[in-house]
Image (cartoon, rainbow, N blue to C red):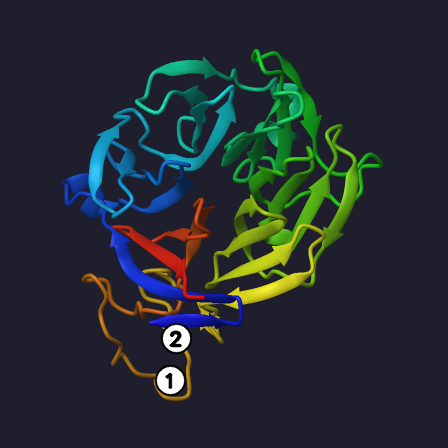
Amino acid sequence: MIIGTGKHTYTWHEHWARIPSTPSGRNNGRTHGIAALPDGRVIVFAQMVPGVLVYDAQGTLIDQWGDRFVGGHGLQAVQENGETFLWLVDQLSCEVCKTTLDGQLVLRLDHPPLADCPEGKYMPTWADVNPLNGEVWVADGYGGSSLYRWSARGDYLGSIVGDEQGNNPFDSPHGLAFGPEGRLYIADRANHRIAVLDGAGQTIEERTNVCHSPTSLAIQDGLLYVAELFGGVKILTTDLNPVAHLGQHPKLEPAADWPQKPKWEWPAFADTDDWPEVGGTPHLRPGVFSSPHGIAVGPNRDIYVAEWITGGRIIKLSPAT
Protein backbone atom coordinates (compact mmCIF):
# COMPACT_ATOMS: atom_id res chain seq x y z
CA MET A 1 0.00 0.00 0.00
CA ILE A 2 1.28 3.47 -0.98
CA ILE A 3 0.46 6.61 1.02
CA GLY A 4 1.57 10.24 0.77
CA THR A 5 2.41 12.37 -2.26
CA GLY A 6 5.45 13.64 -4.13
CA LYS A 7 8.80 13.11 -2.44
CA HIS A 8 6.93 12.13 0.73
CA THR A 9 5.43 8.97 -0.75
CA TYR A 10 5.82 5.83 1.34
CA THR A 11 5.08 2.13 1.25
CA TRP A 12 3.03 1.09 4.30
CA HIS A 13 4.24 -2.07 6.05
CA GLU A 14 1.43 -3.19 8.35
CA HIS A 15 2.68 -4.96 11.51
CA TRP A 16 6.29 -4.64 10.32
CA ALA A 17 7.27 -6.12 13.68
CA ARG A 18 5.27 -7.82 16.40
CA ILE A 19 5.67 -7.97 20.15
CA PRO A 20 6.05 -11.42 21.76
CA SER A 21 2.77 -13.21 22.43
CA THR A 22 3.10 -13.48 26.20
CA PRO A 23 0.48 -12.96 28.94
CA SER A 24 1.71 -9.44 29.68
CA GLY A 25 1.89 -8.66 25.97
CA ARG A 26 -1.65 -9.85 25.34
CA ASN A 27 -3.09 -8.15 28.42
CA ASN A 28 -1.38 -4.83 27.72
CA GLY A 29 1.64 -4.74 25.43
CA ARG A 30 0.95 -1.20 24.26
CA THR A 31 3.87 -0.06 22.13
CA HIS A 32 4.98 3.35 23.37
CA GLY A 33 8.50 4.55 22.59
CA ILE A 34 10.46 3.58 19.50
CA ALA A 35 14.01 4.33 18.35
CA ALA A 36 15.86 3.60 15.08
CA LEU A 37 19.60 2.95 15.38
CA PRO A 38 22.22 3.82 12.74
CA ASP A 39 22.93 0.13 12.08
CA GLY A 40 19.30 -0.58 11.12
CA ARG A 41 18.13 -2.08 14.40
CA VAL A 42 14.89 -0.76 15.91
CA ILE A 43 14.10 -0.69 19.64
CA VAL A 44 10.56 -0.57 21.03
CA PHE A 45 9.52 0.21 24.61
CA ALA A 46 6.30 -1.69 25.34
CA GLN A 47 4.19 -2.10 28.46
CA MET A 48 5.01 -5.74 29.05
CA VAL A 49 7.68 -7.84 30.72
CA PRO A 50 10.37 -7.62 29.50
CA GLY A 51 9.58 -4.24 28.03
CA VAL A 52 12.61 -3.34 25.87
CA LEU A 53 12.34 -5.15 22.53
CA VAL A 54 15.16 -5.12 19.97
CA TYR A 55 14.46 -5.91 16.29
CA ASP A 56 16.78 -6.34 13.35
CA ALA A 57 16.35 -4.41 10.10
CA GLN A 58 13.81 -6.98 8.85
CA GLY A 59 11.56 -6.67 11.91
CA THR A 60 12.67 -9.91 13.60
CA LEU A 61 12.91 -9.84 17.39
CA ILE A 62 16.55 -10.49 18.32
CA ASP A 63 16.74 -9.43 21.98
CA GLN A 64 14.57 -8.31 24.90
CA TRP A 65 15.31 -7.13 28.42
CA GLY A 66 14.02 -4.82 31.17
CA ASP A 67 11.83 -6.83 33.54
CA ARG A 68 11.24 -3.92 35.92
CA PHE A 69 9.66 -1.51 33.40
CA VAL A 70 5.97 -2.28 33.93
CA GLY A 71 5.04 1.27 32.85
CA GLY A 72 7.39 1.51 29.86
CA HIS A 73 6.79 4.77 28.03
CA GLY A 74 9.36 7.19 26.60
CA LEU A 75 12.41 5.97 24.69
CA GLN A 76 15.20 8.02 23.14
CA ALA A 77 18.48 6.86 21.60
CA VAL A 78 21.41 9.28 21.92
CA GLN A 79 24.96 9.25 20.57
CA GLU A 80 27.92 10.00 22.83
CA ASN A 81 31.48 9.74 21.53
CA GLY A 82 30.51 7.17 18.94
CA GLU A 83 28.48 5.02 21.36
CA THR A 84 24.69 4.72 21.51
CA PHE A 85 22.79 4.94 24.79
CA LEU A 86 19.11 4.74 25.61
CA TRP A 87 17.04 7.03 27.81
CA LEU A 88 14.05 5.14 29.22
CA VAL A 89 11.08 6.64 31.05
CA ASP A 90 8.67 4.50 33.09
CA GLN A 91 5.43 6.37 33.73
CA LEU A 92 4.37 4.17 36.69
CA SER A 93 7.60 3.87 38.67
CA CYS A 94 8.63 7.38 37.51
CA GLU A 95 12.10 6.00 36.78
CA VAL A 96 14.15 7.93 34.23
CA CYS A 97 17.38 6.15 33.40
CA LYS A 98 20.23 5.91 30.91
CA THR A 99 21.32 2.46 29.80
CA THR A 100 23.58 0.76 27.30
CA LEU A 101 21.97 -1.03 24.38
CA ASP A 102 22.08 -4.31 26.30
CA GLY A 103 20.43 -2.84 29.40
CA GLN A 104 23.36 -1.96 31.67
CA LEU A 105 22.41 0.97 33.91
CA VAL A 106 24.60 4.06 33.40
CA LEU A 107 22.65 6.78 35.22
CA ARG A 108 19.34 7.12 37.06
CA LEU A 109 17.82 10.53 37.68
CA ASP A 110 16.48 11.34 41.12
CA HIS A 111 12.88 12.43 41.61
CA PRO A 112 12.71 16.26 41.26
CA PRO A 113 12.13 18.18 44.49
CA LEU A 114 8.49 18.01 45.52
CA ALA A 115 8.40 21.81 45.78
CA ASP A 116 9.11 22.04 42.04
CA CYS A 117 6.24 19.68 41.10
CA PRO A 118 2.91 21.48 40.58
CA GLU A 119 0.41 20.11 43.11
CA GLY A 120 3.04 17.55 44.08
CA LYS A 121 2.45 15.54 40.90
CA TYR A 122 5.18 13.86 38.88
CA MET A 123 4.62 11.22 36.21
CA PRO A 124 7.27 11.60 33.48
CA THR A 125 6.67 10.58 29.88
CA TRP A 126 9.84 11.37 27.85
CA ALA A 127 13.48 12.40 28.09
CA ASP A 128 16.16 13.66 25.72
CA VAL A 129 19.66 15.13 25.87
CA ASN A 130 20.84 18.54 24.68
CA PRO A 131 23.67 17.68 22.24
CA LEU A 132 25.47 20.95 23.00
CA ASN A 133 25.96 20.50 26.75
CA GLY A 134 24.70 17.04 27.72
CA GLU A 135 21.85 18.32 29.87
CA VAL A 136 18.97 15.88 30.28
CA TRP A 137 15.47 17.27 29.95
CA VAL A 138 12.41 15.34 31.11
CA ALA A 139 8.79 15.94 30.11
CA ASP A 140 6.28 15.43 32.91
CA GLY A 141 3.35 14.83 30.60
CA TYR A 142 1.09 12.91 32.97
CA GLY A 143 1.87 14.66 36.25
CA GLY A 144 2.24 18.39 36.77
CA SER A 145 2.72 19.30 33.07
CA SER A 146 6.21 20.63 33.61
CA LEU A 147 9.70 20.19 32.20
CA TYR A 148 12.68 19.28 34.39
CA ARG A 149 16.37 19.25 33.62
CA TRP A 150 19.51 17.70 35.01
CA SER A 151 23.19 18.05 34.21
CA ALA A 152 24.99 15.35 32.26
CA ARG A 153 26.17 13.96 35.62
CA GLY A 154 22.63 13.83 36.99
CA ASP A 155 22.65 16.99 39.14
CA TYR A 156 19.20 18.56 39.31
CA LEU A 157 19.05 22.03 37.68
CA GLY A 158 15.42 23.15 37.86
CA SER A 159 11.97 23.11 36.32
CA ILE A 160 9.99 25.01 33.68
CA VAL A 161 6.21 25.34 33.68
CA GLY A 162 5.74 27.91 30.90
CA ASP A 163 7.75 30.69 29.36
CA GLU A 164 9.90 33.10 31.33
CA GLN A 165 6.89 35.24 32.32
CA GLY A 166 4.85 32.25 33.46
CA ASN A 167 2.62 32.49 30.39
CA ASN A 168 1.68 29.67 28.02
CA PRO A 169 1.82 26.89 30.62
CA PHE A 170 2.26 23.41 29.28
CA ASP A 171 -0.64 20.98 29.28
CA SER A 172 0.57 17.40 28.92
CA PRO A 173 4.01 18.06 27.42
CA HIS A 174 4.12 14.45 26.34
CA GLY A 175 7.15 14.07 24.06
CA LEU A 176 10.26 16.08 23.32
CA ALA A 177 13.26 16.03 21.03
CA PHE A 178 16.40 18.13 20.70
CA GLY A 179 17.56 19.34 17.33
CA PRO A 180 21.30 19.29 16.50
CA GLU A 181 21.54 23.02 17.18
CA GLY A 182 20.27 22.62 20.77
CA ARG A 183 16.68 23.71 20.23
CA LEU A 184 14.12 21.70 22.20
CA TYR A 185 10.89 20.73 20.43
CA ILE A 186 7.98 19.81 22.70
CA ALA A 187 4.82 17.91 21.81
CA ASP A 188 2.47 19.87 24.09
CA ARG A 189 -0.40 17.50 23.45
CA ALA A 190 -3.38 18.89 25.36
CA ASN A 191 -2.54 22.42 24.14
CA HIS A 192 -2.57 21.09 20.54
CA ARG A 193 0.74 22.79 19.87
CA ILE A 194 4.42 22.35 19.18
CA ALA A 195 6.60 24.57 21.36
CA VAL A 196 10.27 25.32 20.74
CA LEU A 197 12.63 26.39 23.52
CA ASP A 198 16.26 27.37 23.54
CA GLY A 199 18.82 25.68 25.77
CA ALA A 200 17.97 28.02 28.65
CA GLY A 201 14.27 27.23 28.49
CA GLN A 202 13.19 30.43 26.78
CA THR A 203 10.37 30.17 24.24
CA ILE A 204 11.56 30.66 20.67
CA GLU A 205 8.43 29.73 18.81
CA GLU A 206 5.12 27.94 19.18
CA ARG A 207 2.51 26.82 16.70
CA THR A 208 -1.01 25.72 17.56
CA ASN A 209 -2.48 25.40 14.07
CA VAL A 210 -0.49 22.51 12.60
CA CYS A 211 -1.10 19.56 14.97
CA HIS A 212 -4.19 18.40 16.83
CA SER A 213 -2.67 15.83 19.23
CA PRO A 214 1.16 15.79 19.03
CA THR A 215 2.49 12.91 21.08
CA SER A 216 6.13 12.32 20.14
CA LEU A 217 8.74 13.78 17.81
CA ALA A 218 11.71 12.81 15.68
CA ILE A 219 14.13 15.16 13.89
CA GLN A 220 16.24 14.36 10.85
CA ASP A 221 17.70 16.36 7.96
CA GLY A 222 15.88 19.57 8.84
CA LEU A 223 12.47 17.91 9.18
CA LEU A 224 10.31 17.37 12.25
CA TYR A 225 8.26 14.16 12.28
CA VAL A 226 5.22 14.25 14.57
CA ALA A 227 3.09 11.35 15.81
CA GLU A 228 -0.51 12.47 16.34
CA LEU A 229 -2.38 10.42 18.93
CA PHE A 230 -5.76 10.83 17.24
CA GLY A 231 -4.63 9.27 14.01
CA GLY A 232 -1.83 10.44 11.74
CA VAL A 233 1.78 11.44 11.18
CA LYS A 234 2.78 14.93 10.14
CA ILE A 235 6.04 16.14 8.69
CA LEU A 236 7.03 19.75 9.35
CA THR A 237 10.08 21.85 8.69
CA THR A 238 11.99 22.65 11.86
CA ASP A 239 10.48 26.14 11.74
CA LEU A 240 7.08 24.41 12.03
CA ASN A 241 5.74 24.74 8.52
CA PRO A 242 3.70 21.73 7.30
CA VAL A 243 5.23 19.54 4.60
CA ALA A 244 3.16 16.34 4.53
CA HIS A 245 0.32 14.46 6.24
CA LEU A 246 0.52 10.67 6.30
CA GLY A 247 -2.18 8.16 7.18
CA GLN A 248 -4.49 10.81 8.54
CA HIS A 249 -7.91 9.72 9.68
CA PRO A 250 -10.53 12.12 8.26
CA LYS A 251 -12.72 11.87 11.35
CA LEU A 252 -11.89 9.89 14.45
CA GLU A 253 -14.21 10.05 17.44
CA PRO A 254 -12.84 8.00 20.33
CA ALA A 255 -15.29 5.67 22.04
CA ALA A 256 -15.18 4.84 25.74
CA ASP A 257 -12.68 2.04 25.09
CA TRP A 258 -10.62 3.88 22.47
CA PRO A 259 -8.26 3.06 20.86
CA GLN A 260 -9.37 -0.56 20.87
CA LYS A 261 -12.71 0.30 19.30
CA PRO A 262 -12.95 3.88 18.06
CA LYS A 263 -16.00 5.31 16.37
CA TRP A 264 -14.85 5.34 12.75
CA GLU A 265 -17.04 7.66 10.74
CA TRP A 266 -16.35 7.47 7.03
CA PRO A 267 -19.10 7.75 4.40
CA ALA A 268 -18.61 4.16 3.22
CA PHE A 269 -18.52 2.64 6.71
CA ALA A 270 -20.40 5.04 8.95
CA ASP A 271 -22.35 3.45 11.82
CA THR A 272 -21.28 -0.08 10.94
CA ASP A 273 -19.03 -2.65 12.55
CA ASP A 274 -18.02 -4.10 9.19
CA TRP A 275 -14.33 -3.25 9.47
CA PRO A 276 -11.48 -5.57 8.59
CA GLU A 277 -9.41 -6.92 11.43
CA VAL A 278 -5.67 -6.36 11.47
CA GLY A 279 -3.70 -8.79 13.57
CA GLY A 280 -6.78 -9.73 15.60
CA THR A 281 -7.56 -6.18 16.70
CA PRO A 282 -10.85 -4.90 15.31
CA HIS A 283 -11.26 -1.50 13.69
CA LEU A 284 -7.70 -1.10 12.46
CA ARG A 285 -7.12 -0.44 8.80
CA PRO A 286 -3.84 -0.58 6.84
CA GLY A 287 -2.92 2.85 5.51
CA VAL A 288 -4.71 4.69 8.31
CA PHE A 289 -3.28 5.42 11.75
CA SER A 290 -5.35 4.88 14.87
CA SER A 291 -3.24 6.02 17.83
CA PRO A 292 0.42 6.85 17.02
CA HIS A 293 2.41 7.14 20.22
CA GLY A 294 6.10 6.82 19.35
CA ILE A 295 7.91 7.78 16.15
CA ALA A 296 11.45 7.32 14.84
CA VAL A 297 13.26 7.89 11.55
CA GLY A 298 15.91 5.48 10.30
CA PRO A 299 19.10 6.29 8.37
CA ASN A 300 17.33 5.58 5.05
CA ARG A 301 14.39 7.90 5.87
CA ASP A 302 12.25 4.96 6.93
CA ILE A 303 9.60 6.07 9.42
CA TYR A 304 8.70 3.76 12.31
CA VAL A 305 5.50 4.30 14.29
CA ALA A 306 4.44 2.54 17.50
CA GLU A 307 0.72 2.73 18.25
CA TRP A 308 -1.06 2.72 21.61
CA ILE A 309 -2.91 -0.51 20.98
CA THR A 310 -3.29 -3.50 23.32
CA GLY A 311 -1.00 -6.14 21.88
CA GLY A 312 0.98 -3.48 20.03
CA ARG A 313 0.99 -2.17 16.48
CA ILE A 314 4.34 -1.34 14.87
CA ILE A 315 4.26 0.17 11.39
CA LYS A 316 7.09 0.96 9.00
CA LEU A 317 6.84 3.51 6.21
CA SER A 318 9.61 3.13 3.63
CA PRO A 319 10.24 5.84 0.99
CA ALA A 320 8.63 4.85 -2.31
CA THR A 321 10.37 7.53 -4.39
Quarter of the image with the N terminus is bottom left
Task: Please tell me which residue lies in front, 21 or 241.
Answer: 241
Q: Residue 167, located in which quarter of the rendered image?
A: top right
Q: Secondary structure at mark 1?
A: loop
Hey, which residue is sitting farthest front in the picture? 321
Q: In the rendering, at what x and y percent does residue 176 appear?
A: 58, 40
- What residue do we see at 29% from left, 44% from top? 57
Query: Which residue is painted at 32% across and 21% down in the image?
Result: 103
Q: Position of residue 199 (x, y in %)?
A: 72, 29
Label 1: how many Cα within 10 Å (few below 14, some 14–19, many 20+): few
Amino acid type assigned to the residue bearing label 1 in the image: Ala
Q: What is the residue that sits farthest to the right in this orientation?
A: 165
Q: Are marks 2 and 1 in contact (CB under 8 Å)?
A: yes
For residue 264, which numbered disc appears in the image?
A: 2
Q: Position of residue 214 (x, y in %)?
A: 56, 53
* Amino acid, disc 2: Trp
- Which residue corresponds to mark 1? 270
- Does residue 51 appear to the left or right of 8 in the view shown? left
- Name which quarter of the figure residue 255 lies in: bottom left
Q: Is residue 71 left or right of residue 64?
A: right
Tell me the residue at 72%/52% (across/down): 239
Q: Is residue 295 left or right of residue 140?
A: left
From mark 2 to mark 1, how far is it between C-alphas? 7 Å
Q: Please provide percent x and percent y for residue 68.
A: 29, 24
Q: What is the total number of numbered labels drawn onto the structure image? A: 2
**From what the image shows, is residue 84 above or below residue 125?**
above
Q: Residues within 10 Å of mark 2 (few under 14, many from 20)?
A: many
> Taking the image as drawn, is residue 265 in sight?
yes
Screen quadrant of the C terminus: bottom left
The residue lying toward the viewer, choosing from 40 and 164, is 40
